[in-house]
Amino acid sequence: GQSLEQPSEVTAVEGAIVQINCTYQTSGFYGLSWYQQHDGGAPTFLSYNALDGLEETGRFSSFLSRSDSYGYLLLQELQMKDSASYFCAVRDDSDSWGKLQFGAGTQVVVTP
Amino acid sequence: DSGVTQTPKHLITATGQRVTLRCSPRSGDLSVYWYQQSLDQGLQFLIQYYNGEERAKGNILERFSAQQFPDLHSELNLSSLELGDSALYFCASSVGQGSSPLHFGNGTRLTVT
């Protein structure tokens, strides 16, 4: 089976930096993904890490340590529009085609 | 716009009824996934299809069934509906599996009264 843990909520002010941690347990592992979901909207893909290290995409970066079964999403120069839920997800290919399982999500609240 | 189309956007029905949710994947995508999201909850994986065949199953209730048709669109059938089935149902598609990112539709909000 799989399990993912991430904090339920993080609050920060505009311009700040936020780090959302995700720890996972899975029998197989094929990468850690991050998705953003604004209230009531469709989740959108942010990043994917298959190998250890940091991936940077604009103001957002994602990190993975496979030995620690741990990753994080770093949101820099926070903007009001970054207020949303952020989900980490892992794909477990120990079964046939690797369903993508999501964590419970971290609600990021950005204040002025 | 993700290119994934879900219909209807909203559905209100009574307990015991049956509904069908429809999903058209992004052009070129062969994989279709269904997820359920209850109020303030995460995304619960239901089922995945690849090119018409079922490939992975999550904690999908026996009252729920799905299929993917030759034109790659998919339908999720929910029967004997209960109040607890009220949720947002998302369809997502991807080119394949593995590292392919999922592209989500805007969801169908189901309310069971």
Image: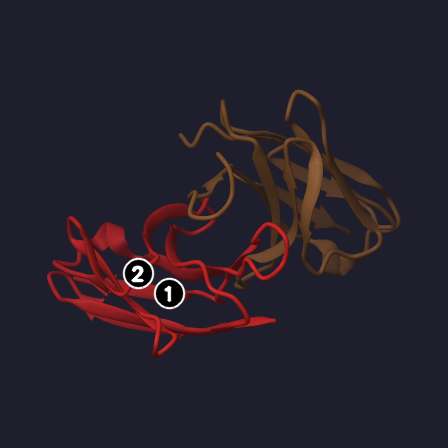
Q: Residue A93: image x %, image y %?
A: 55, 57
Q: How many marks?
A: 2
Q: Residue A8: image x %, image y %?
A: 41, 73
Q: Earlier in the sequence, mark 1 or mark 2?
A: 2
Amino acid type, residue under disc 1 in the picture: Gln
Q: Tell me the shade of chain A.
A: red
- Kindly indicate the quadrant of the structure image that contains residue A18: bottom left
| Residue under numbered circle 2 | A51
- Parent chain of label 2: A
The residues tagged by marks 1 and 2 sit, at their Cα atoms, a distance apart of: 26 Å
| Residue occupying image coordinates x 79% and y 57% | B61
In the image: residue B12, left or right of residue A45: right
Work out which residue is located at the far bottom of the displayed protein and give it.
A68
Q: Secondary structure at mark 2?
A: loop
Q: Secondary structure at mark 1?
A: strand
Packing grade of label 1 (10 A; few <14, some 14-19, many >=20) is many
Q: Residue A104: image x %, image y %?
A: 49, 67
Q: Tell me the shade of chain B.
A: brown
* Labels 1 and 2 in the same subunit: yes
In the image: residue A45, left or right of residue B18: left
Q: Residue A107: image x %, image y %?
A: 37, 65
In this rendering, which labeled residue sits more in front, label 1 or label 2? Answer: 2
| Residue occupying image coordinates x 55% and y 64% | B41
Quadrant assignment for the N terminus of chain B: top left
Asked if the residue at tag 2 contacts the one at tag 1, i.e. Cβ–Cβ closer than 8 Å, the answer is no
| Residue under numbered circle 1 | A107
